[in-house]
Image (cartoon, rainbow, N blue to C red):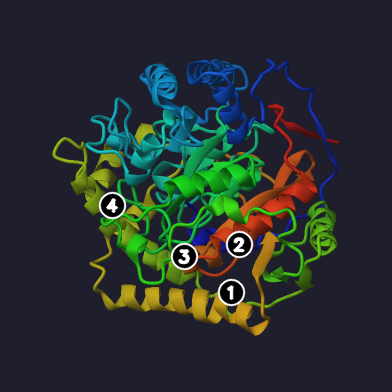
Amino acid sequence: MKSSVVLAAAAEVAAAPQPTPTRAPSPQLPTFEFAEWTLDQFQRAMISGELTSARLTEAYLKRIAGLDRQGPSVNALIELNPEAMDLARACDHERIATGSRGPLHGIPILVKDNLDTADRMQTTAGSLALVGPSALRDSFLVARLRDAGAIILEKTNLSEWANFRGSNSISGWSGRGGLTRNPYALDRSAAGSSSGSAAAVSANFVAVAIGTETDGSIVAPATYCGIVGLKPTLGWLSRTGIIPIAASQDTAGPMTRTVTDAAILQSVLTARDPQDLSTVATGRPNHPDFREHLRSDALRGIRIGVARDFFRSHRMMNPLIQRTLDSLKEAGAILIDPVRIPNRGDVGEAEFEVMLYEFKAGLNAYLASRGPDVPVKSLAEVIAFNERVAERELKLFGQDTLVRAEAKGPLTEPAYRVARELCLRRARAEGIDSVMDRDKLDVLVAPTGGPAHVIDLINGDRWLGGSSTLAAVAGYPNITVPCGTVGGLPVGFSFFGRAWSDAKLLGYAYAFEQILQARRPPEFQPTLKVL
């Protein structure tokens, strides 16, 4: 999860015109009978008896072994659930005996390695400091998945500590898991911090996965890896049992290949959790079936604000984005272009200050919840551990962000309160709510970001801008959908808006997806050759 300070600085990097890339020779890839299958397709095949969960799980494990562990070596996954096949067989027996539990029954799913699982897998946020005992309890969301009949197949790799460890970080790298690569071009970044979840879904290692976001960590890897990513309104999904960054912005969310699958997964995960007060907050609507809002004509007559403040001029991207906007108009939407968002660039330092305070408080509380056997019991101990194993943890970049967080005091300090109030006011009342009221908008849109940058182990990440920050700071929903490719690399387009408008946004995204049909499976190119 990139800090907004880093994102804002990177967004100012001007993109010089580049020669037209061409694809390298495509590697010989094994055929996969379940490529691009959706949750509905799997359930229909299981109901008819043409497919079993055990057969599907075995097929996914074989594909993972051939493409993630070997071959292209995407390295999206950090740990296999040794009980996966047993769980799949149990799902098959249950289906025969008592019927299906619902749309996730018998479906293998991946979860990011910052969600607790009380099984034989570990939960480490990619850090060697947490290697050891498993979590005592499932996270609330993992429990929801198990109750729905899903199989937790593996944990996904991520940017260590959700990309909140140090400056000049390398998205998709963790001390425990190594480096996740982009399945479209293996020398390109998969972004972060939910890099493994995005790369795995795109590569057809599973149909759906869970990511988490504080600012950009679902939508950025989703756009880089050519999939759908939903960052819900803060409060739809519980954070209990998830390694935190900032309680005022953290949320999990679906990462899928289709908007329909995102709506299904969001519906299953949504529930009130007494241990997470954001899920029982005043103003939270009743639990909807998000799928009911998916209509192919959902864009007709709606007022869309084109947030050009988040656009970055790029010779190869500009035509794609213009075609994308034209497609919205052709679908019957009314474009207000441009809309200007007051103070949209004035939350960066305050957001990072809030993150520093909340990370220390949240991580210390989380570590206490892991029981007496957890190897480190505080942020201070994490920092000390990293120093002891610096040759393994700190070789590529440091931990200055952790050190700055440890220096912060309690959440009662005036500096924290002032920064938090500024973030809320600028992102909500003076930001998204203000512009949507002023221009009578139904939704805001912008490119999610640019095409994937080349992995640079010396200098770290280099981003071509992004549009995630305002919705992230506000705690409002944001969904990205593939809109096309630039030089063979996918680009996503974001829909974001008011609190609790997730169902409407899913509807808009679904209609958009049906028009463009822009998702293209990756071919695991070793590189993009530039003439």
Residue under numbered circle 1: 344
Q: Is residue 228 in view?
A: yes
Residue 35 occupies quadrant: top right
Disc on res. 504: 2
Q: Nearer the viewer, residue 26 or 436?
A: 436
Q: Position of residue 510 (x, y in %)?
A: 68, 52
Q: What's the CA distance linking mark 1 and mark 3?
A: 15 Å
Mark 4 or 3, which is nearer the eye?
3
Mark 2 vs 3: CB contact within 8 A = no
Q: Residue at x 75, y 58 (%)?
A: 297
Q: Is 433 drawn above or below residue 358 in the view shown?
A: below
Q: Amino acid at mark 2?
A: Lys
Q: What's the CA distance linking mark 2 and mark 4?
A: 34 Å
Which of marks 3 and 2 precedes in the sequence?
Answer: 3
Residue under numbered circle 4: 363
Mark 1 or 3, which is nearer the eye?
3
Q: Nearer the viewer, residue 462 or 283?
A: 283
Q: Amino acid at mark 1?
A: Arg
Q: Residues within 10 Å of mark 1 (few under 14, many from 20)?
A: some
Residue under numbered circle 3: 475
Label 3's element?
loop
Q: Position of residue 34 (x, y in %)?
A: 64, 23
Q: What's the CA distance linking mark 2 and mark 3?
A: 16 Å
Q: Residue at x 37, y 39 (%)?
A: 142
Label 1's element?
loop
Mark 1 vs 3: CB contact within 8 A = no
